[in-house]
Amino acid sequence: MGLPIFDSQLLLQLAGHQSWADSLHWKALHENGTLREDLEIRKRLNHVVWALRTLTGLAQGGNPDPSTMKEIESADQLEAAQGKANAELIERIKTLDLQKIIALPRGPQGPWEAPAGALLLQAIMHSQHHRGQNASRMRQLGATPPMTDFILWYALGRP
């Protein structure tokens, strides 16, 4: 089977959904101080921003330095950083050759290679996973998380 082809239009839709879903989570956080200040949620959001930046940087052929990522304490700054990282992801999907093979410095069996599109898809899937964890945490804290299913986003006209 050859290498998978990464479709920019599908990735753009997935990244658009991600931006929308993240904004709904931030709305819930703004409406509930307990959620906004929860250390577990905040730690995860910092991790999501770091992963988005790292994977987007790798897809560009860069070699991001994890030691430069410092935890963002302010909720407003964290929200802005996540929004900026999502915007950068969308811009890279539009501008990068998604089939270009990127040499990666480390992986499960040492250095390896992957198409830029695979790294950007991973950025989306990784964020989705952690958004689900944060939704579960919201329930643990007595709140009802927003509905952020892809099909709802699609039915609403992809806002």
Image (spheres, grey):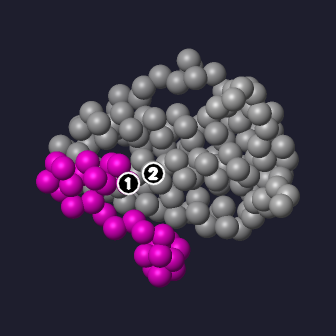
For mark 2, what is the residue? 129
Q: Residues within 10 Å of mark 1 (few under 14, many from 20)?
A: few
Q: Is residue 95 above or below residue 52?
A: below
Q: Residue 32 at what x, y percent from top left?
A: 20, 50
Please say if the residues under marks 2 and 1 sit with CB atoms less than 8 Å apart: yes
Q: CA distance from mark 2 to mark 1?
A: 5 Å
Residue 57 location, quadrant: top right
For mark 1, what is the residue? 132
Q: Is residue 128 above or below residue 153?
A: above
Q: Tell me which residue sits at (27%, 60%) in the image.
A: 145
Is 31 left, or right, of 3 in this rendering? left
Q: Tell me which residue sits at (42%, 69%) in the image.
A: 149
Q: Residue 37 at what x, y percent from top left?
A: 24, 37
Three-letter amino acid code of the residue under disc 1:
Gly
Does the rendering let one see residue 101? yes
Reply yes or no: does residue 158 show up in magenta.
Answer: yes
Which contiguous range is marked in magenta? 132-159
Reply yes or no: does residue 61 show up in magenta.
Answer: no
Q: Residue 34 at what x, y percent from top left?
A: 18, 43
SS for callout 2: helix
* Viewer-side residue, 68 vs 117: 117
